[in-house]
Amino acid sequence: MVVWVEYTVAFFLLVGSAFALVGSIGLYRFPDFYMRLHGPAKATTLGVGCVLIASIVYFSSRDEGLHVHELLITLFLMLSAPVSAYMMAKAAVQQQVKTFNRKD
């Protein structure tokens, strides 16, 4: 395999795993529902997107032609994750979920 392909795949895998880690830590550490929703909705979506881009580069360089299966997954993820986060936040507002109030 060509060296630049290996570096590109490794870069996207490392960046994607870093985003996924930050999103997971945010899910664990934030105190209320709305803050916990923000971490995975943003960071983990970018992390999975980077991993899928690495997969596109790897399999496209391995075989002849462009592999678009991962591109379709990425497109679906980028469209569905913000919509699902919005719907969960809207449901939480209607259910009057308590927010974290910091006492100074």
Image: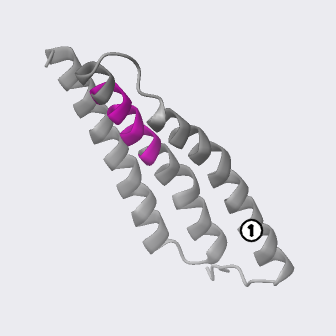
Residue 68 falls within the magenta-colored stretch = no
**Image coordinates for residue 56, horizontal then vertical, percent:** 37, 30
SS category of the residue bearing label 1: helix
Q: Residue at x 40, y 65 (%)?
A: 25
Magenta part of the protein: which range? Answer: 48-58
| Image position of 47 with respect to 94: above or below | above
Q: Position of residue 91 (x, y in %)?
A: 79, 75
Mark 1: give few (<14), some (14-19) or many (20+) Cα within 10 Å.
some
Which of the image's four quarters has the N terminus?
top left
54 inside magenta stretch: yes
Residue at the disc numbered 1 = 89
Front-most of residues 63 and 16: 63
Most frequent secondary structure within the magenta stretch: helix
| Amino acid identity at mark 1 | Ala
Seen in the image, is 16 located left or right of residue 73?
A: left
Comparing 12 with 62, the one in front is: 62
Residue 81 rendering spot, x and y as whole percentages: 62, 53
